[in-house]
Structure formats: C-alpha cells, structure tokens
Amino acid sequence: MTREQPFHPQLRVARFLPRTIITARTLPTLRRLTKLSARARRPDAQVVAVDDNVSVHVFRPATARPRTPALLWIHGGGMVLGDAGQDRAFCRRVADDLGIVVVSVEYRLAPEHPFPTPLEDCYTALQWLARQPDIDPARIAIGGQSAGGGLAAALTLLAQERGEIRPVLQLMSYPMLDDRTTTRTDIDPRRLRIWSPASNRFGWSAYLGASGGEVSPLAAPARYEDLSGLPPAWIGVGTNDLFHDEDVAYARRLQEAGVDCTLHVVPGAYHNFDSIEAKPPVSRAFVKAQIAALDEALNGG
C-alpha cells in the first residue's frame, strides 16, 4: 500500500474529506451527534427488543410471502460508534427490491463492551431471526459494512462453530478483519479517507480490551486458521481503503479453502465511499453488486 494512487475520477468529494474522524477524543461528540441524527430520522422499521441488551430494526417488504428469506445486517462504526438505523436506506432498498426481511442489529459498543459482547449480541439477534415463524431459517444471509463486515465474518465463523444456524451468504463491505494491520508502517495515509491508521488503532484497542496479548480469532477473523466449510462470501473494497490488503488476503484464503468467494475491488475508492458519495455510477454499481449477490443466494438469482 505504499504506492500513491489517485482517487476514482467519479468520487469528486474524496479530496475534501478528512483522513481521520473517529478517535478517543472525538468519540463522545460523535456519539452525541449519532443520537441527534437518530431522533431526526423518519421511522422506517419496526424496532423489536430481543432481550434486555439487544434490539433489532426490522425492515419488511411491501408484499409478504410465507417463509421469507432474510438478511441480518450489522452496522459499521469502528466497533465504537453507530446504530442499527444508520443504514436504513440500504436495508429498505434490499427489503423492497428482493422481497425479503432485513434485520439490522443494535449491538453494544466498545470500549464499554469489548469482545465478545458485540459478537454475542449479533448471535443473539441471529438466533431470534431464525426462530421467527415467517422466516425461512435455511435462507438467511449475514452482512455488514466496515466493522459490521468484520462482525459478519466473525458471526459466520461462530455460527459454524455452534452448528445451530447455517447462513447461505456472508456479505462484507470493506470489512475490518485483522488487528495486525495496526502494526504496519508501510501505509501511506495521504491516500486514505475517513478511516486512518490512528482510528484503526483506537478501534481495535477498544474492541480487544484487556486481551493480554492473546487475540481470539473470533475477534479478528483474519487470524482464524481453518476457513473451510464456510458459506459463500462476497467481499467488496476500494484500493484506497485501509482495509484493502487484509480484505483481499481474506478473500484469497477463503477461495483457497474451497469457499465460493467473490472479490469486488474498486480502483481509487476510499472507505465508505458508496455511502458518502452514493450517486456516482461507481457507487451505484458497488451497491448493485451486493444486491445481486443477495438475490442469487436468497432468491436463486
């Protein structure tokens, strides 16, 4: 990642964006802004309490069908920020376009709740979803963006370990997979936007907590040794994303383990580009590719 690369020509806002947003110093303010934003949103989903700690936002299609396929969606925010409603436009589109139920998880955040709490919250939501009488438990996909993408990978691994639910797809947009990226010194921060090495160090330290140097592979899925037997995967990332190298490496390891994995790399795209600049064709194509992968896995294409 040392070679300078220009931003994609359609992503014209890139040069005006900051390299770093989330730090220990900015987190309290960002959390307050997140709460204010949540209050201003128009209700677009049913909010359901799963238990005392976990709730979900349920996006249902306009026309219901018996035994509906479903997507469990996990929001991003570096493990320390965000909420279940922040990706509501994407969740609503998927529900309506594919005729499926989309459930977005409100999981507890680090550093107050380090690993394994956020992952276990997501598993609680997955169990709840699989038990719903109108959901086909054999047609559930797990997806997420950034930190949520990393949690989606970890949740897929956890589901395989426990053997109760078998997802049909793991959909990961620029997932946060490898804590060892925090030790790299060859990354040029000038071509990064939104998520920087400093943010990454803060996010991982908050999530791992007092791990004592022992990092569970369920916390950092890139450390998981045996990836065989996992459900098909879709991984998308830009070349100007801090997570590019770890995402490409994970995709290749999945493929080498015999897992059907689609790797969608966008030249010159930065972290979270499709949300920040949603209108350019390159962003629309990225989202369309995700929806197509979900359609094939859940509806048979």
Image (cartoon, rainbow, N blue to C red):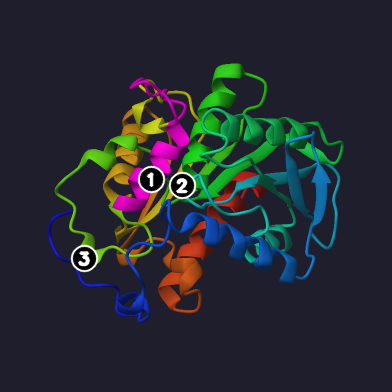
Task: Say which amino acid is labelled 3.
Answer: Arg
212 within the magenta span: yes
Residue 85 position (above or below residue 144): below
Of the numbered discs 2 and 3, the one sitting upstream in the chain is 3
In the rendering, which numbered label is found on residue 190? 3
Q: What stretch is highlighted in magenta?
A: 198-219
Of the numbered discs 3 and 1, the one sitting upstream in the chain is 3
Q: Nearer the viewer, mark 3 or mark 1?
A: 1
Instruction: Name which residue lies at 53% across and 56% down.
Output: 28
256 or 218, which is in the foreground? 218
Q: Which of marks 2 and 3 is in front?
A: 3
Q: Which of marks 1 and 2 is in front?
A: 1
Q: Position of residue 189 (x, y in %)?
A: 22, 60
Label 3 environment density (alpha carbons within 10 Å; few <14, some 14–19, many ≥20): few
Instruction: Name which residue lies at 73% across and 44% down.
Output: 69
| Badge 3 element | helix
Q: Position of residue 204 (x, y in %)?
A: 40, 39
In which quarter of the view is residue 224 placed? top left
Q: Name the residue under label 2.
A: 234
Q: Name the residue under label 1.
A: 202
| Badge 1 element | helix
